[in-house]
């Protein structure tokens, strides 16, 4: 027991960098401020991360191992694989790398939270965060109306998996869509009960945002349009807990 306590104390003093926006979210939620040596530049952009002011308290990196070597991290967090060369270099430099898979389900997200919390020496923080998710599960609304999550250009989400699970916790049921996309014609002919409209990069000049400006993409008189903070849906990590609590105010 004493050895485990010593290991936690040692981990709690680790210098940690994150090379991915999704691991930025985990690191900022689970580490102590003195441990964080770097987060990605994306976390510091208001258009990408809701708590960008917190992220700007720390040095930034460009998502590469080389950009953080000079900051002397002992642990580097990243996600999604494709970084074998970086992992090899990190081992040569004595830097531990945790490369998390992109979560496909809520259980994956809970596992990632627990793993990062343990790695940075704060398992209790991970337990508290996962307890908040469990509380959402226990209080999930009983009625889940037909819903389409709508992003730029008609992008949507799968009817199963992590996004759909977060939606269900908020009180919405994602409609199955071919290719996880919806057309303006579908919104006209078969409108959902709820149009959960992402505001990610709203107002930005792009083809996707021009599509979102079409009247049908804003909802019809047969749908109720509810806005959601699209930034939280990029990684669907810890920020989704507050987003779900906020969306529950609009659920039937």
Image (cartoon, rainbow, N blue to C red):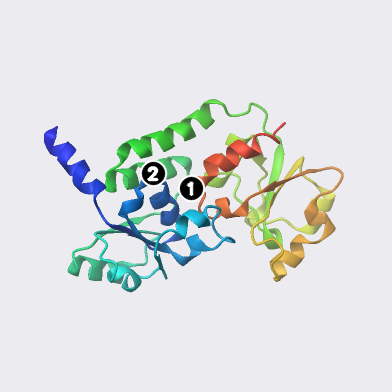
Q: Which mark is residue 113?
A: 2
In this view, the residue in front, 172 or 131, is 131
Rendering quarter of residue 251: top right
Residue 42 spot, x, y in % from top left: 49, 64
Q: State the residue at coordinates (48%, 47%).
A: 237
Specify few, some or many for label 1: CA neighbours under 10 Å numbering under 14, 14-19, or 20 or more: many
Residue farthest to the right, as pictured: 221
Helix, strand or loop under label 1: loop
245 relative to 96 in the view: left or right: right
In this view, the residue in front, 65 or 44, is 44
Q: State the residue at coordinates (56%, 26%).
A: 139
Above/below status of 38 relative to 236? below
In this view, the residue in front, 114 or 192, is 114
Give the quarter of the figure containing the C terminus. top right
Q: Which mark is residue 9?
A: none
Q: State the residue at coordinates (63%, 39%).
A: 246
- Residue 17 seen in render: yes
Q: Which mark is residue 237?
A: 1
- The residues tagged by marks 2 and 1 sit, at their Cα atoms, a distance apart of 9 Å
Residue 171 spot, x, y in % from top left: 64, 34
- Residue 168 seen in render: no
Helix, strand or loop under label 2: helix
Residue 67 spot, x, y in % from top left: 35, 72
Q: Earlier in the sequence, mark 2 or mark 1?
A: 2
Rendering quarter of residue 65: bottom left
Q: State the residue at coordinates (71%, 71%).
A: 205
Specify few, some or many for label 2: CA neighbours under 10 Å numbering under 14, 14-19, or 20 or more: many
Residue farthest to the left, as pictured: 3
Above/below status of 63 relative to 161? below
């Amino acid at each position: 027991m004493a050895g485990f306590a010593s290991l936690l104390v040692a981990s709690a003093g680790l210098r940690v960098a994150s090379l991915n926006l999704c691991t930025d979210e985990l690191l900022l939620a689970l580490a102590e401020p003195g441990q964080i040596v770097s987060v990605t530049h994306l976390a510091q952009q208001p258009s990408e991360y809701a708590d960008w002011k917190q992220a700007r308290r720390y040095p930034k990196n460009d998502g590469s191992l080389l950009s953080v070597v000079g900051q002397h991290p002992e642990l580097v967090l990243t996600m999604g694989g494709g970084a074998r060369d970086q992992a090899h270099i990190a081992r040569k430099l004595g830097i531990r790398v945790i490369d998390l898979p992109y979560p496909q389900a809520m259980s994956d997200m809970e596992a990632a939270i627990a793993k990062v919390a343990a790695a940075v020496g704060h398992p209790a923080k991970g337990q508290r965060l996962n307890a908040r998710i469990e509380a959402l599960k226990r209080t999930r609304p009983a009625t889940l109306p037909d819903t389409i999550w709508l992003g730029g250009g008609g992008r949507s989400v799968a009817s199963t998996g992590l996004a759909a699970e977060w939606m269900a916790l908020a009180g919405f049921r994602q409609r199955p869509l071919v290719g996880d996309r919806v057309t303006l014609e579908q919104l006209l002919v078969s409108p959902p009960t709820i149009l959960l409209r992402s505001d990610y990069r709203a107002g930005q000049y792009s083809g996707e945002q021009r599509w979102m400006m079409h009247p049908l993409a804003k909802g019809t008189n047969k749908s109720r349009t509810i806005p959601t903070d699209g930034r939280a849906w990029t990684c669907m990590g810890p920020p989704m807990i507050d987003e779900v609590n906020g969306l529950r105010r609009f659920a039937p």
